[in-house]
Amino acid sequence: MRNTSQLALAFATIERPHAVQRLIRSVRRYYPDLPVYVADQSQRIEPMTAFYGEMCVNVLRMPYDAGVCASINRLVLLRSSETKRFGPVEVV
Amino acid sequence: MAAAVFPEHLGRIGDTLLSGENCVNRLMQRAGLRIFFDPSIVVQHRIPASRLTRTWFRRRMFWQGVTMNLLNRYVEEQSAPLGLNCEEASTVWEEVLIPSSPAAWIDLFDDNSSSPFQEQLDTIEKLGYLLESQAVVVGR
């Protein structure tokens, strides 16, 4: 496994709990210590609270439907003091 | 690039089908940064049946046109202050043909039109681009 001490995974989501769980479980299989940040704009994130805790995910609670860009911006702000480079990943 | 942020007036919010969250890629290109593409990555995308209708495709293409106009303007506005190369031209349409009769408008949304569906979508996308340039698109 490559050194991930300088990496973090941060992404935005809304109303996709099953997709988020699949992604994070998959990431944790290979990168158990990778810092993971999720900006969740879902109406209710309480059903995900236990999962996020179990997977050591840092959750940024966003207003409902705040938007992908607003969510990513908050994540960038959150990490800006300790992150030198951001690598946006586009999955199409 | 530090000054650039993701534009919060773009991207999916509410019921609109705006996109353009990836505009940072355009700015990165202008800044001479590298963008990696790995064709070996396979992604399964679950598409609900509601997004496989002609009505949805028309909505999607209209908002794609709106997005392109907003996106081009954002990239241009951000490039100069960031000292980025502005020589790379944004994709624009210099001519947008507007349906000129009620029948032509109806035909644009007719599932049984004699025009190819792709042509309908192209026209609707351009109309979205044009209407956004005139600041008359509501709902966002």
Image (cartoon, grey):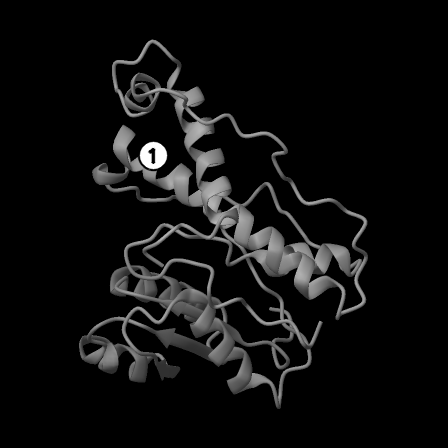
User: Which image quarter: residue B25?
Assistant: bottom right
Q: Residue furthest bottom?
A: A81
In the image: residue B85, left or right of residue A16: right
Classify the position of the N terminus of chain A by image quarter: bottom right
In the image: residue A49, left or right of residue A80: left
| Classed neighbour count for the residue bearing mark 1: other residues with Cα under 10 Å, few (<14), some (14–19), many (≥20) | some
Which residue is identified by label 1? B57
**Which of B44 and B71 lies nearest the eye of the viewer?**
B71
Q: Residue furthest front?
A: B101
User: Which image quarter: residue B59?
Assistant: top left
Q: Residue furthest top?
A: B114
Q: Work out whether A4 lies above or below B100.
A: below
In the image: residue A29, left or right of residue B58: right
Which chain is indicated by disc 1?
Answer: B
Return the x and y of residue B41 as percentages of the image width and height.
Answer: 54, 45
Q: Residue at the spot x=65%, y=58% of the render?
A: B75
Q: Callout 1: helix, strand or loop?
A: helix
Q: Residue at the spot x=38%, y=82% of the render?
A: A60
Return the x and y of residue B97 as percentages of the image width and height.
Answer: 50, 25
Q: Work out whether B58 lies above or below B103.
A: below
* Residue A34 in view in this figure: no
**Which of A69 and A4 lies nearest the eye of the viewer?**
A69
User: Which image quarter: residue B99?
Assistant: top left
Q: Amino acid at mark 1?
A: Phe
Q: Residue at the spot x=29%, y=37% of the render?
A: B56
Q: Residue at the spot x=45%, y=36% of the render?
A: B127
Return the x and y of residue A86 as percentages of the image width and height.
Answer: 63, 72
**Which of B73 and A36 lies nearest the eye of the viewer?**
B73
* Residue B106 in view in this figure: yes
